[in-house]
Amino acid sequence: MFQPVAVFTGGHALFERRFIVSVGVVIPAAGQGKRMGTKESKQFLLFEDQPILIHTIRVFETHPAIDEIIVVMKEDEIARTRKLIQKEGFLKVTQVIAGGKERQESVYRGIQSLDTDLVLVHDAVRPFVSHQAIDRLLESVQMHGAAILAVPMKDTVKQVDDAGIVEMTPDRSRLWSVQTPQAFRREWLLEAHQLGLVREQLATDDSMLVEELGIDVRVVEGEYTNIKITTPDDLILAESIQQMRRKHV
């Protein structure tokens, strides 16, 4: 069983770097984002005069526990991404590599390119994850080897059949909406992806693959502001979140 090798002092303001293990981040950004309805890939859409991807990378670039970042892009967007990263002076982004046809393949390539003890996988278009949430996630993955951010469901959820008829109403108190980053011991996540390839299993997130290994995945409470920007409405919500953050600075 994975044993903890690091200690957190509590909130981010009191965070001390005392890691023996190394921590890497894989940011898959090879998708087109068809739901956004734009020719431009959603990760390159401007938010406050910068691509969303740059805002996302900055969160991890400035976190003291992160050692290395791998960005996974479409082949024809690699050069553009490298220029943006160089312009910002990001030092922790060690590679920008080509992704696969599906997100799962892109993440797998990113994991293979890392040589860290722990790996975080984070959506390229979730720019609002806080350092405090990452701290909580890292604390849990240090203890247990597999942890994900999630928030309790606010709405009642219905399970329906193909005809649109309600089959059941799950207990909302047991339902959580999953976010990223998701954090794992690297060797576990690598094994999980390899098994997924053998089984030709398409998973909607990385924790599904790890669960198939029989590993318990811990849920760490995230933040409702950690939204994924995938539609035009999300951009409007992102503006509101940014304005709210300015008021609390």
Image: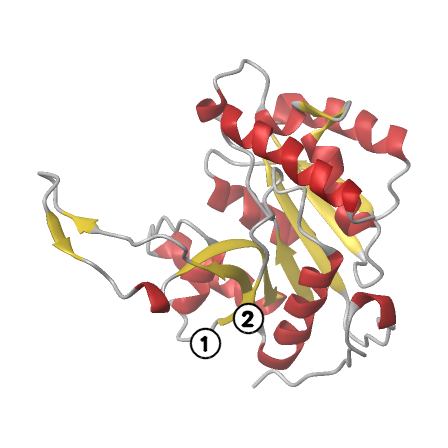
Residue under label 2: 146
Q: Earlier in the sequence, mark 2 or mark 1?
A: 2
**Left or right placement of residue 191 versus residue 169 in this view:** right
| Spatial CA span between label 2 and label 1 | 7 Å
Look at the picture and state if 248 lies above or below 38: below
Residue drawn at x 71%, y 54% is: 130
Q: Crowdedness of circle 1 by 10 Å Cα count: few (<14), some, many (20+)?
A: some
Residue 8 coordinates in the image, percent (x, y): 78, 77
Image quadrant assignment for residue 29: top right
Q: Nearer the viewer, residue 199 or 206?
A: 206
Q: Amino acid at mark 2?
A: Ala
Residue drawn at x 48%, y 46% is: 104
Kindly give the residue lying farthest to the front in the view shown: 247
Residue drawn at x 79%, y 59% is: 66
Residue under label 1: 216
Mark 2 residue element? strand
Residue 65 coordinates in the image, percent (x, y): 80, 63
**Left or right placement of residue 69 versus residue 124 in this view:** right
Look at the picture and state if 139 lies above or below 235: below
- Residue 30 visible to an observer of this rendering: no
Q: Nearer the viewer, residue 237 or 110?
A: 237
Total number of numbered discs in the rendering: 2
Q: Nearer the viewer, residue 115 or 20?
A: 20
* Quarter occupied by the N terminus: bottom right
Image quadrant assignment for residue 75: top right
Residue 72: mark:
none
Q: Amino acid at mark 1?
A: Asp
Marks 2 and 1 close (CB-CB < 8 Å):
yes
- Residue 73 visible to an observer of this rendering: yes
